[in-house]
């Protein structure tokens, strides 16, 4: 007769929040390419199985990291008017992505149905619905804002990692692409906040009309 095995218990002295913080510290130090279960375990000075207790896979670890990054977009002290509220939330979201090295890359690569992410989405959608958008338009406007924030911020963070060196101007030197050549200083402009505000304004323009 074999002994009944005891159910596994969580490792003492370590919780999921500590694991996620260590993963985010690793992200800030070395970038998204260095984030792994092994890397987090080494940073904490524990075995990989200990990390896997709290995050069953690397994918799960990335989801928890993404949710913690989004938690940086605070939901308090928001403006009253719905449109100002959406704009403020969108800017807070982008700042939360920028607060972490490769933050946009981590969040864009996950679909984290976790508390901070859900609270943020619910708050934005509530404002859009309050503004008179129907459910489909509110949902699609929300996604459009997310894609804008994630895509633009990934570009900004990738450019920073390359020491701010653009490559477009050199590719246009022979005159093959005249329209691009005319607009190149705006195409390569580093006013990311201005570009974000411009696009966000277009997304929220005349919300009651179907385009």
Image: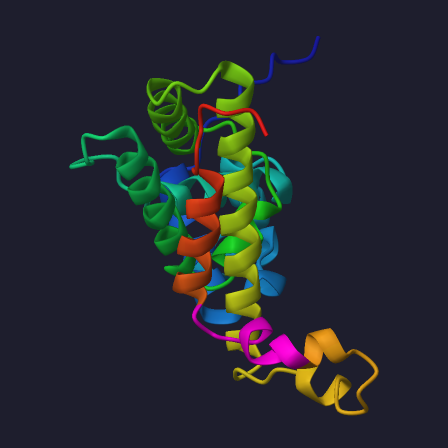
Q: Which residue: 59% across, 17% down?
A: 5
Q: Residue 82 versus residue 108: which sits nearer the camera?
A: 82
- One can see residue 65 in this view: yes
Question: From the image, which quarter does the C terminus lie in?
Answer: top right
Q: Residue 86 versus residue 95: which sits nearer the camera?
A: 86
Which residue is the extreme one toward the top? Answer: 1
Task: Please provide percent x and percent y for residue 37.
Answer: 59, 51
- One can see residue 14 in this view: no
Give the quarter of the image for residue 32.
bottom right
For the magenta stretch, what is the residue range? 182-191
Task: Please provide percent x and percent y for residue 110.
Answer: 59, 40
Give the quarter of the image for residue 83.
top left
* Relative side of 150 to 78, left or right: right
Vertical order, 8 against 186 (above or below): above
Q: Which residue: 58% across, 42% down?
A: 49
Residue 149 belongs to magenta span: no
Question: From the image, which quarter does the N terminus lie in?
Answer: top right
Q: Residue 204 versus residue 77: which sits nearer the camera?
A: 204
Q: Which residue: 40% across, 42% down?
A: 70
Vertical order, 21 against 12 (above or below): below
* Relative side of 125 to 7, left or right: left
Task: Please provide percent x and percent y for residue 191.
Answer: 43, 70
Give the quarter of the image for residue 12.
top left
Q: Which residue: 56% across, 44% down?
A: 147
> What is the magenta segment's predominant secondary structure?
helix
* Relative side of 168 to 79, left or right: right
Q: Residue 140 versus residue 25: which sits nearer the camera?
A: 140
Task: Please provide percent x and percent y for residue 27.
Answer: 49, 61
Residue 186 belongs to magenta span: yes
């Amino acid at each position: 007769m074999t002994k009944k095995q005891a159910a596994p218990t969580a490792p003492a002295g370590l919780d999921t929040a500590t694991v996620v913080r260590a993963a985010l510290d690793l992200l800030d130090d070395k970038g998204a390419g260095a984030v792994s279960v092994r890397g987090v375990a080494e940073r904490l000075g524990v075995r990989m199985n200990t990390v896997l207790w709290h995050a069953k896979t690397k994918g799960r670890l990335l989801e928890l990291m993404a949710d913690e990054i989004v938690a940086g977009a605070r939901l308090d002290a928001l403006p009253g008017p719905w449109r100002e509220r959406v704009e403020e939330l969108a800017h807070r979201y982008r700042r939360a992505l920028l607060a972490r090295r490769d933050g946009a890359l981590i969040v864009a690569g996950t679909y984290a149905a976790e508390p901070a992410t859900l609270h943020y989405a619910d708050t934005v959608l509530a404002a859009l619905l309050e503004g008179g958008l129907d459910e489909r338009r509110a949902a699609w406007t929300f996604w459009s804002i997310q894609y804008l924030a994630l895509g633009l911020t990934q570009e900004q963070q990738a450019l920073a990692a390359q020491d701010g060196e653009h490559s477009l101007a050199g590719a246009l030197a022979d005159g093959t692409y005249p329209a691009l050549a005319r607009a190149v200083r705006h195409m390569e402009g580093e006013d990311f906040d201005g570009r974000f505000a411009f696009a966000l304004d277009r997304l929220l323009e005349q919300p009651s009309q179907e385009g």
